[in-house]
Image: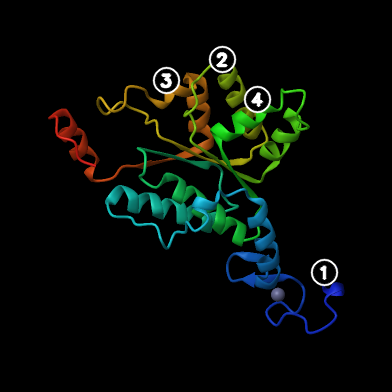
Amino acid sequence: MSTESANINLAPCADCGGTGWELVEGKGVRPCRCKRAVRGDLLLQQSRIPTRFALCTFENFNPHCMSLSRALMTSKKFVDEYPIVDVGLLYLGSCGVGKTHLAVSVLRELIRKGIPGLFYDFRDLLKEIQDSYNPNTRNSELKILSPVFEAEVLVLDELGASKPTEWVQETMTHIINKRYNERKITIFTSNYLDITLGSAYDETLTDRVGVRLRSRLHEMCRLVPMEADDYREMIKNRRGGRFTS
Ligand SMILES: [Zn+2]
């Protein structure tokens, strides 16, 4: 059944008998633990998850209010159901609420299942593309973008954080449309919300990415709003001139 068993001459894995596949009741087959462990390590090294998020997992995410509990549940469900999912995830919420933590946790869990994935901070990606225009660098735009286009799962962190110049707008549209057309799963995070909640948010996601891209994101992602309980309180206090943090 598998060509891999030919490479394992001694003691085939007890779980799969060396085939590399294990049967999951009611779900079909998945790569065996023995195969996933080796592949998982390699994929994790290649995933570009930044060091400061390297330890983010579902277990150490603190869902201290309803909105965050729901976001955690949605994320876990997404991992469980993958690859039987039609759309990716779009985490929206204010700074420090744990959007990147959850996005990275999803990516790590998928990698553990043997699914290749890539993490990119959108600002870093744009910077790398811009740098590639410099004739002295050896990287071409295509060389940078091909893994972004081809990754089975892509996390794009901090969508809308870059000043939306015409070039940024075009590049974002290019990347997002390409993944949309290829029906690839993308997970986004953004500090910009769909609606304005008060003076702290003068701009919405639509202001930052444009109407067309916003509606494309709706098509290709499930929205995961994240709002800490103390958020409204914080806004209220700010308006009253009292600052809490
Ligand atoms: Zn095995």
Q: Residue at x 16, y 33 (%)?
A: 236
* Mark carried by residue 140: none
What residue is disc 3 on?
Answer: 207
Look at mark 4 in the image and give the residue it sits on.
Answer: 130
Q: Are marks 2 and 3 in contact (CB under 8 Å)?
A: no
- 63 relative to 36, above or below: above
Q: Earlier in the sequence, mark 1 or mark 2?
A: 1
- Res 201 quadrant in image: top left
Check disc 1 and give the amino acid type. Answer: Glu
- Read off the residue under disc 1: 4
SS of the residue under disc 2: helix
> Residue drawn 20% across and 40% down?
244
Q: Residue 211 in the image: x percent, y percent?
A: 47, 19
Q: Residue at x 22, y 44 (%)?
A: 230
Q: CA separation, marks 2 and 3?
A: 13 Å
Earlier sequence position, callout 2 versus callout 4: 4
Q: Which residue is mark 2?
A: 166
**Residue sitting at x 58%, y 56%:** 110
Q: Nearer the viewer, mark 3 or mark 1?
A: 3
Q: Would residue 56 appear left or right of 203 to someone viewing this image?
A: right
How far across and how far down the image is residue 4, in percent? 82, 69
Report the Cα–Cα distance between label 4 and label 1: 42 Å
For the residues carrying marks 1 and 2, which lies nearer the camera in this image? 2
Quarter of the image where ligand 1 sits:
bottom right
Q: Earlier in the sequence, mark 2 or mark 3?
A: 2
Report the mark closest to the observer, 2 or 3: 2
* Element class at badge 3: helix
Can residue 1 be seen in the rendering of this structure?
no
In front: label 3 or label 4: 4
How much space separates mark 1 and mark 2, taking CA atoms?
Answer: 50 Å
Q: Amino acid at mark 2?
A: Glu
Quarter-wise, where is residue 208 in the image? top left
